[in-house]
């Protein structure tokens, strides 16, 4: 889904003529919808999904031992493999708040898990749709009085958002649970039967 398609969906949910081009600044409905889309994109990705979770990633301190968190990293914490350490992000600086430490200075590369913020155009379609429907609800709530949007549109948008969330969660489960029977060894045992169009074996 392109950003323009997403904005067209948001405004269509509100009963507003869909835009022909993206606007990123100003006070127009298109620009406002674009800002809301970015906000919802970050909020949803902050929850953590299979596509944006980064595990056991080393961050590197500078000459003063301070670790600056990448701008695209969300919800940084110590790696699960390093459960004795506790790291928190304060601003864009990583702090070691392990009991007895409480310092922003590191003598070794801290191992972290974090959620990576992807551009809207780069994330899986089911999650894109979920973000768009959430953004549509936010847009309608903010513009309802100004644009005289009927209450039924908000109810419908909320229903679309619930359905899109359910579909995104189903996609997440599908992504995070690999088919243990779809391995080279298992396929050899079954006689290398053909796969479906989704890339799974037929049973």
Image (tube, rainbow, N blue to C red):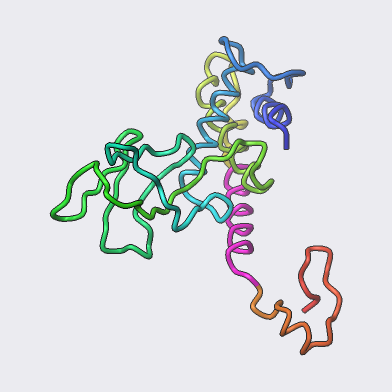
**Quadrant where the image shows the N terminus:** top right
**Quadrant where the image shows the C terminus:** bottom right
Find residue 92 and report its image quarter: top left
Left or right: 186 as drawn, with respect to 165: right
**Chief SS of the magenta region:** helix
Residue lying at the far left in this picture: please name it.
100
Where is 150 relative to 178, above or below?
above
Residue lying at the far front in this picture: please name it.
63
Left or right: 30 as drawn, with respect to 91: right
Say how many tags the image has: 0
Find residue 105 and report its image quarter: top left
- Is residue 163 rendered magenta in the image? yes
Residue that appears at 52% across and 17% down: 145
Residue that appears at 72% across and 27% down: 4
Position in image of residue 146 (x %, y %):
54, 13
Position in image of residue 33 (x %, y %):
59, 23
Residue that appears at 61% across and 12% down: 28
Where is 178 relative to 37, above or below?
below
- Is residue 66 rendered magenta in the image? no
Highlighted range, magenta: 160-178
Q: Nearer the viewer, residue 160 or 55?
A: 55
Position in image of residue 140 (x %, y %):
56, 26
Residue lying at the far bottom in this picture: please name it.
189
Left or right: 72 as drawn, with respect to 198: left
Residue that appears at 79% across and 87% down: 190
Q: Nearer the viewer, residue 28 or 51?
A: 51
């Amino acid at each position: 889904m392109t950003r323009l398609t997403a904005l067209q969906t948001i405004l269509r949910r509100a009963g507003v003529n869909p835009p022909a081009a993206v606007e990123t600044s100003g006070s127009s409905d298109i620009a406002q919808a674009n800002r809301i889309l970015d906000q919802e994109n970050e909020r949803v990705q902050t929850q953590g999904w299979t596509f944006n979770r980064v595990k056991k990633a080393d961050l590197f301190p500078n000459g003063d031992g301070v670790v600056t968190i990448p701008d695209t990293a969300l919800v940084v914490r110590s790696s699960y493999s390093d459960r004795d350490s506790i790291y928190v992000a304060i601003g864009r600086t990583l702090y070691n708040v392990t009991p007895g430490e409480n310092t922003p200075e590191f003598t070794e590369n801290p191992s972290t898990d974090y959620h990576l913020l992807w551009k809207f155009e780069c994330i899986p379609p089911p999650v894109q749709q979920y973000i768009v429907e959430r953004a549509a609800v936010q847009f309608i709530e903010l513009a309802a009085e100004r644009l005289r949007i009927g209450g039924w549109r908000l109810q419908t948008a909320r229903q679309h958002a619930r359905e899109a969330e359910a579909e995104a969660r189903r996609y997440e489960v599908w992504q995070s649970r690999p088919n243990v029977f779809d391995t080279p060894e298992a396929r050899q045992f079954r006689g290398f039967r053909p796969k479906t169009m989704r890339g799974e074996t037929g049973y």
